């Protein structure tokens, strides 16, 4: 499994969230296994998503697609994507 963190700066969380929800099936078809959404407690228009993807190739194909970037740009979303290599899981 591949893990990715997307950090988003939103014009409006409430405007963006329904679009994120609508794209769930598209993400799943592209290889997304899970997406955990977090919101900055000090800034309600900053969000982070921890994605679990089936493989790096599919993750990059979806997350770096021009279609996704254009859709986010139209909504006034700026973002960074960080691809993670898991080193260890502990308690």
Image (tube, rainbow, N blue to C red):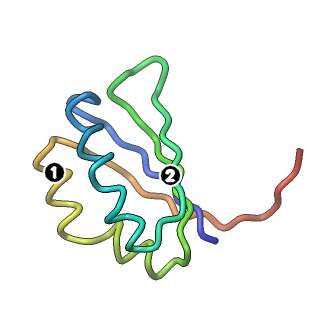
Measured in 3D between alpha carbons, the distance from the residue under mark 2 to the one under mark 1, in whole angstroms, is 21 Å
Q: Nearer the viewer, mark 2 or mark 1?
A: 2
Rendered position, 90 above or below 70: above
Crowding near the residue tagged with mark 2, few <14, some 14–19, many ≥20 C-alpha atoms within 10 Å: some
Label 2's element?
strand
Q: Secondary structure at mark 1?
A: helix
The residue where tag 1 is placed is 73
Q: Residue at x 42, y 57 (%)?
A: 81
Q: Residue furthest bottom?
A: 57
Of residue 26 and residue 73, the one placed in the foreground of this image is 26
From the image, which quarter does the N terminus lie in?
bottom right
**Left or right placement of residue 12 versus residue 35 in this view:** left
User: What residue is rendered at 47% in x and 66% in y?
Assistant: 32
Q: Name the residue: 53% across, 68% down.
A: 53
Q: Position of residue 86 (x, y in %)?
A: 71, 64
Q: Position of residue 62 (x, y in %)?
A: 34, 71
Give the image quarter of residue 16: top left
Residue at the spot of label 2: 35
């Amino acid at each position: 499994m591949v893990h990715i963190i997307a950090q988003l700066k939103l014009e409006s969380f409430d405007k963006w969230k329904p679009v994120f929800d609508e794209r769930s099936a598209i993400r799943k078809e592209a290889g997304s296994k899970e997406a955990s959404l977090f919101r900055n407690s000090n800034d309600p228009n900053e969000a982070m998503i921890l994605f679990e993807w089936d493989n790096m190739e599919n993750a990059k194909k979806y997350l770096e697609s021009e279609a996704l970037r254009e859709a986010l740009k139209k909504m006034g979303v700026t973002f960074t994507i960080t691809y993670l290599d898991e080193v260890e899981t502990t308690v």
